Image (cartoon, rainbow, N blue to C red):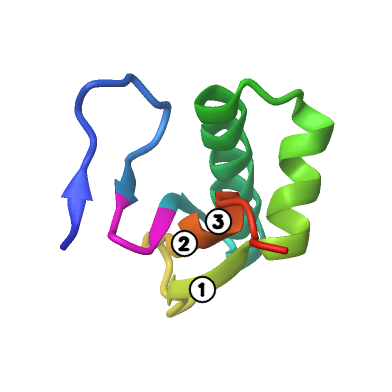
Amino acid sequence: MLRPHRDRRPRRPWLETDADWIATGSGPTLEAAVEMAVEELTRLLMARFSLDRATAFLLVSARGDVRIGQCARIPGLDATAYAMFPKAATRPTSP
């Protein structure tokens, strides 16, 4: 189930599914869209788990996934990207 979050005031929309937290990004280039999505996912993890920026970014780098939403290279149409982080990565593993 997809749940948009309205209780927090992120700079960009973010979503939550049963399996993942998802941040969005858009920009004139795919690189800019990916950068924005990764930055927003880093901020989301910082807020949710009281992490410093470096630790949150390392988690995104290690376990995050980036997906392309659109990249048509049509003037005036931004590229979009999604950065996803699995909720399973935050659960302790059993010995």
Q: Disc 2 marks which amino acid?
A: Tyr
Mark 1 residue element: strand
Dot 2 crowding, Cα within 10 Å, few <14, some 14–19, many 20+: many
Taking depth in this image into account, of 95 and 55 the one nearest to the observer is 95
- The x and y percentages for residue 86 are 51, 61
Residue range in magenta is 16-21
Compared across the picture, whether 15 is left or right of 28 comes to left
Sequence-wise first label, 3 or 1: 3
Sequence-wise first label, 3 or 2: 3
**Mark sitting on residue 82:** 2
Relative to 39, residue 1 above or below: below
Relative to 3, residue 13 above or below: above
Relative to 12, residue 32 above or below: below
Q: Marks 1/2: CA distance?
A: 5 Å
Q: Which numbered mark, 3 or 1, is in the foreground of this view?
A: 1
Q: Are marks 1 and 2 in contact (CB under 8 Å)?
A: yes
